[in-house]
Image: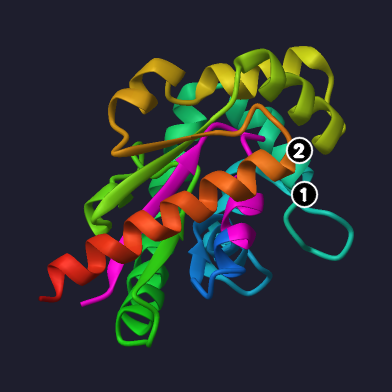
Amino acid sequence: MSLCVGVTGGIASGKSSVARAFAEHGIPWVDADDLAREVVKPGEPALEEIAARFGPRVLDDDGRLNRGALREIVFADADERRWLESVTHPRIRERLEKRLAEMTAGPAPYHLLVSPLLFESGQDALVDRRLVIDVPEAQQIARTAARDGVDEAQARAIVAAQMPRRERLALADDILDNGGDFAALTQRVAELDRDYRQLCRQLNR
C-alpha cells in the first residue's frame, strides 16, 4: 500500500519547493496547479466555457488563457470565482485521480498530492495524511507580490480569498513551518520523510 500525503498551504507558502525536497528522497508527486493549467489549454472545453463567459479579455493574442486578467476578475468577485471552480475543479479531479492511481501502483512507499485548494476543493478526501506548509501572512503577501508582479493590494486580496490560516492549520495532520531558510526546510522534509516511511511500514505489516 502506497500512502498518499496531501501537501497544501496558502499562496507563496513554498509548496513546490517542499515537493522538490521530497523528490530528493525518491518521492513522486502530482501538482493540482499543473493539472489546472492543463485543463485550460487551447482546445480544452474548460477554456471554451471561460472565453464564452468573460469574452476576449481573458485570452491573449494566441488564444491562450490570460491568467492575470482572469485572476483580476475572479478575485474581485466571489460568485465568478465559484463559477470558475465549478468549471475547472471536476476536470482537475478526474486527472488527479488517474495520476494518483498510477503512483499508488508504483514503487515509492508514499507519494504527494500538492494542491493549494486541498481542503476547499474536497481533494483531501483523496489523501491519507494532510501536510500544511505554513508561513506568516505578511511573508505570503510579500512573496506573492514579488513572484507574480502584482501590487500589495492584489496580493492581499488573493491571500484573503483563501482559507484562513487558522482553519488550514486546524485541519493538518502535520505542519511544516517554511518561514525560515532552505536548509531548515530540507531538514524538516527529511524528518517527515522518515516519519512517513515508518508509517508505511506499520500499515504494510
Using the image, tell me which numbered label, if any, was put on residue 46.
none
Q: Name the quadrant of the N terminus.
A: bottom left
CB under 8 Å between discs 1 and 2: yes
Q: Position of residue 54 (x, y in %)?
A: 64, 41
**The one of 203 and 48 positioned closer to us in this rendering:** 203
Check disc 2: other Cα within 10 Å, few if <14, some if 14-19, many if 20+. Answer: some
Residue 87 seen in the figure: no
The reply to whether residue 106 is visible in this rendering is: yes
Q: Name the kind of residue labelled 2 in the image.
A: Ala
Range of magenta residues: 1-21
Secondary structure beneath disc 1? Answer: loop
User: Which quadrant, please, contains the C terminus?
Assistant: bottom left
Q: CA distance from mark 1 to mark 2?
A: 6 Å
| Numbered circle sitting on residue 69 | 2
Q: What is the x, y in percent for residue 52?
A: 59, 51
Task: Return the residue at label 1.
Answer: 66
Q: For the view shown, which residue lies furthest in the left direction? A: 205
Residue 144 vs 37, above or below: the answer is: above
State the SS at label 2.
helix
Residue at (28% x, 31% y) in the render: 171
Which residue is nearer to you in this view: 96 or 12?
12
Residue at 76% of width from left, 61% of height from top? 64
Q: How is the image coloured?
A: rainbow
State yes or no: residue 198 in magenta: no
> Which quarter of the figure has residue 57?
top right
- Residue 158, compared with residue 104, is above or below; it is above
